[in-house]
Amino acid sequence: MDKEVRKRFYLVFHVAAFLFITIFFILPYLVQISTYFHERGHQIVLDKYGVENSYSVDILSTIPNFFNPKVAKLGATRFDLNEYYKLNDIQRTEVHVAGIISDLRFLFLICIYLTLVNIYTFYKIKYKKNYNLTLILAINWILFMWLLALIQITVANVTSTGGDIFQLIKLIRVV
């Protein structure tokens, strides 16, 4: 192989390897991090009202669960239902909405980062003529994939029958 072909081959290989690693290894753990903070939001409110609760992170099953369409959730806070039913409607609403607020914080922070970094990158390209886009594009790719996953998860959480909003409506009607 001549030198130019070898160089292009390694470039394509490195890009493909990066995409593979980010999609199949990094993205599931980023989603696990946001899931932890989502559940932590529920826990903080449950603790505030004295409801016993727990949440455990299973690092070993993160990747298989992320790609398994039959997995209902990547994580769920366990809590004492009897104590939960003693809460009033506003308190229960606060419990369920706390996770969604955590998701929205992540979405907001990722969007702000992508916006500011891309404006700065445009400035560097247009006016400074000094740029190396490799790191910026890599971070943008990872964060954009995380952003897409979080949007999908948040929409599913708000609209699905297993999500926080449906569970809130269902439990309010029961009491």
Image (cartoon, rainbow, N blue to C red):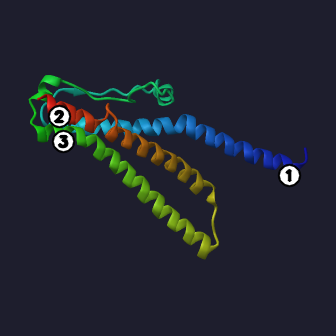
53 above or below 7? Answer: above
Residue 13 placement (x, y as % from top left): 73, 42
Kind of residue at disc 3: Glu
**Badge 2 is on which residue?**
47
Q: Give the residue displayed 52% in from the left and 67% down from the top.
A: 120
Q: Within 10 angstroms of label 3, few (less than 14), some, or many (20 or more) residues?
A: some
Q: Give the secondary structure at mark 1.
A: helix
Could you say where residue 24 lies in the image, as x and y percent from the top left?
56, 34
Q: Position of residue 56 (x, y in %)?
A: 33, 26
Q: How far is disc 1 from disc 3 in space, using C-alphas? A: 60 Å
Report the residue at 50% width, 25% height from top. 64
- With respect to residue 141, does 94 lie above or below? above
Q: Label 1 sits on what residue type? A: Glu
Which residue corresponds to mark 3?
A: 94
Q: Which residue is mark 1?
A: 4
Q: Which amino acid, by three-letter code, is at mark 2? A: Asp
Real-space Cα separation, disc 2 to disc 3, in angstroms: 12 Å
Give the spatial CA distance, label 2 vs label 1. 62 Å
Query: Can you tell which of label 2 and label 3 is closer to the viewer?
Result: 3
- Disc 1 crowd, CA 10 A, few/some/many (<14, 14-19, 20+): few
Question: Closer to the camera, 7 or 89?
Answer: 89
